[in-house]
Image (cartoon, grey):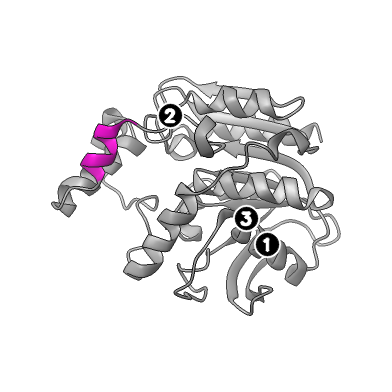
Amino acid sequence: MNREAGKAVAGDGVAIAYQSAGGDAGHDRPLVLLAGQANNHRWWDSSRGDFEDAGYRTITLDWRGVGDSDKPDAPYTTRGFAADVIAVLDDLGIAKAHVYGTSMGGRVAQWVAADFPDRVDALVLGCTSPGGPHAIERDKTVRQTLAQTDRDAAERFLLELMYTPAYLARHQGPYFVLGDPAMPGYARGRHLAASAKHDAWDALPAITAPTLVVHGTDDVFNPAANAPLIAERIPGARRVLIEGARHAYFDEFRAVAGAAVLEFLAER
């Protein structure tokens, strides 16, 4: 299997670390996988192999502020993150790719498709939101519980937002969807602000890439009601709701979610 790691240089000089695996030389089917807020590429550890087994070349990256990427203490935006994705594709010499983003990665993927339509073959938006005043926000009690000063209790609550109780009872971790533990505090704040300020509502109707919207029905971290909002806003978009799944549907419900995404991509 082909494996590659490198660093691309964004337009402002920031180095963006990336990882590429799978694919067959001369027959690559590149698939960019975009992680959630404050997370590095390990977000995809459990499921990227399923796409590689299906013949795709998976490409992940560490957002600026996390992992092996530079961590400038300056404002971040989801639209800026999208430009970082394009810098990675440029460094790899990839003209066009499928793009699959989850959570904040789905917000970034919206901008990749809207701002760089010639670079996107097909688009998958998972457990994400259009942002802005039209989005359905998480309940106030969810925000308050996550912000509590008891960090162990907050992390346990976050786990319960990600996974069902049955899954947590069977799996003791490690979990790679709780944020990069080595991330500086200032960068964590920058990520939070970027995600909170995201608003692609006006750009969604201009997306031309075939689009699949995926969401867990029991997701309250990023409410499932956002899925129809996005699907109805993007021309021709399809929607798949995964019954009983919470925010980390792509991990816990990997078999169902992966099959739905692979079926969609196979049509492209």
Secondary structure type for disc 2: loop
In the rendered image, the residue lying farthest to the top is 243
Q: From mark 1 to mark 2, how far is it between C-alphas? A: 27 Å
- The structure residue drawn at horizontal position 71% and vertical position 33%, both measured from the top left corner, is 211
Q: From mark 1 to mark 3, how far is it between C-alphas? A: 7 Å
Residue 98 located left or right of residue 240 = right
User: Magenta stretch: residue 246 in it?
Assistant: no
Residue 65 located left or right of residue 82 = left
**What residue type is disc 1 on?**
Ala
- The residue labelled by disc 2 is 223
Residue 199 placement (x, y as % from top left): 57, 43
- The structure residue drawn at horizontal position 81% and vertical position 37%, both measured from the top left corner, is 208
Q: Residues within 10 Å of mark 1 (few under 14, many from 20)?
A: some
**Badge 1 or badge 2: first in the primary sequence:** 1
Q: Residues within 10 Å of mark 2 (few under 14, many from 20)?
A: many
Q: Magenta segment range?
A: 139-146
**What residue type is disc 2 on?**
Pro
- The structure residue drawn at horizontal position 74% and vertical position 33%, both measured from the top left corner, is 205
**Badge 3 or badge 2: first in the primary sequence:** 3
- The residue labelled by disc 3 is 79
In the depicted structure, whether residue 155 falls above or below residue 20: above
Q: Find residue 83 and name its label.
A: 1
Of badges 3 and 2, the one in the foreground is 3
In the rendered image, the residue lying farthest to the front is 133
Residue 147 placement (x, y as % from top left): 23, 48
Quarter of the rendering occupied by the N terminus: bottom right
Secondary structure type for disc 1: helix
**What residue type is disc 3 on?**
Arg
